[in-house]
Image: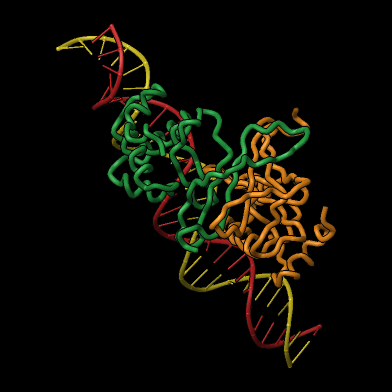
Chain colours: A green, B orange, C yellow, D red
Amino acid sequence: MNNELEFPIQMLHSRKLKATPTRTKLLKEIHAYGSAMPYSLICRKFKNADRVTLYRTIEKLVEKGLIHRAFSNNKETYYALCNTKCTATTHYHNHIHFKCTQCKLVTCEHLNEEVEISLPDFVVDKISINVVGICKSCK
Amino acid sequence: MNNELEFPIQMLHSRKLKATPTRTKLLKEIHAYGSAMPYSLICRKFKNADRVTLYRTIEKLVEKGLIHRAFSNNKETYYALCNTKCTATTHYHNHIHFKCTQCKLVTCEHLNEEVEISLPDFVVDKISINVVGICKSCK
DNA sequence: AACTAAATGCAACGATGTTGCAATAAAAAA
DNA sequence: TTTTTTATTGCAACATCGTTGCATTTAGTT
């Protein structure tokens, strides 16, 4: 996926962030999880940590473009690692977020072609596409 | 937009729901608002009502396909009326939800062409597309 | 080793999600 | 129209999450 993922400290430093235990652990946990990680699960991995610290850690890493909110409904938010093309403000949009109704996993899936959305008279800054269905493994 | 919108009672009855004051009011408020209505604003319109009743009213109308969650981030959810083509389980996906960073409004925008998303080996049930940018009016 | 800017931990509060249960009201039946 | 049935409401109560301020601690630097 991303070579840098094995080096959370370098990832953090590249965005001028201090490599604190909570931050490096968060990056490692999300990476280890393999798909977009629900907040509730993140909490379980950090049950000894302070809730506010975790909150601010997530905010900061989202702000700096190291992770992103892959999926959100009114109940839960899922977090995923950004790929190397992500910057602090933009994310690639030739990928979509897929939520499987069977295994409940949220994954980032790449599309062969960029999605074309024609909205004349609108300025489009960011596109996010969520698909719900049944994933390859569960089908 | 939708003729039925002027008749919240009929809308409710068509889904075998009792036409209670909270339900008819919710449908009217969202319709009157014109774009996807943030939950915080809905609350303000219902400040005398019980919070749990409002919660259950929303749940029920979403479940029955009269309204839908047009947009959600980790902070807030936006609700919009479903069009007549919506059923309890599916929503049209030749429209997108647009959030304007200037006026903060979330609107449903129709696309001339259906969005094509090719995900071989996946079963696609529902596609939702959120676009962030600057709307026609603010540009 | 000392310094400095940034991150953490804690307290504290507000908003939202969620359930159970008794009281109430809407729709249907008589 | 009145009664009956069944769904909805209101309230209490609790859990989770978002958010801020401030004092303490720590990472990266000098």
Note whether B126 is above or below A34 in the view shown. Answer: below
Residue drawn 64% across the image and 46% down it: B129
Residue drawn 45% across the image and 42% down it: A80
Residue B47 seen by the camera: no
Residue A43 seen by the camera: yes
Note whether B75 is above or below C1 in the view shown. Answer: below
Within the image, what quadrant is residue B66 found in?
Answer: bottom right
- Residue B43 or A91: which is nearer the viewer? A91
- Residue A37 or B117: which is nearer the viewer? B117
Screen quadrant of the C terminus of chain B: top right
**Image side of residue A104 versus residue A19, left or right:** right
Residue A21, position as x, y percentages in the image? 28, 33
Note whether B125 is above or below D23 in the view shown. Answer: below
Residue B2, position as x, y percentages in the image? 82, 56
Residue B28, position as x, y percentages in the image? 76, 54
**Image side of residue B12 versus residue B70, left or right:** right
- Residue A122 or C1: which is nearer the viewer? A122
Note whether B139 is above or below A105 in the view shown. Answer: above
Number of marks = 0
Residue A17, position as x, y percentages in the image? 38, 24
Residue drawn 52% across the image and 43% down it: B74
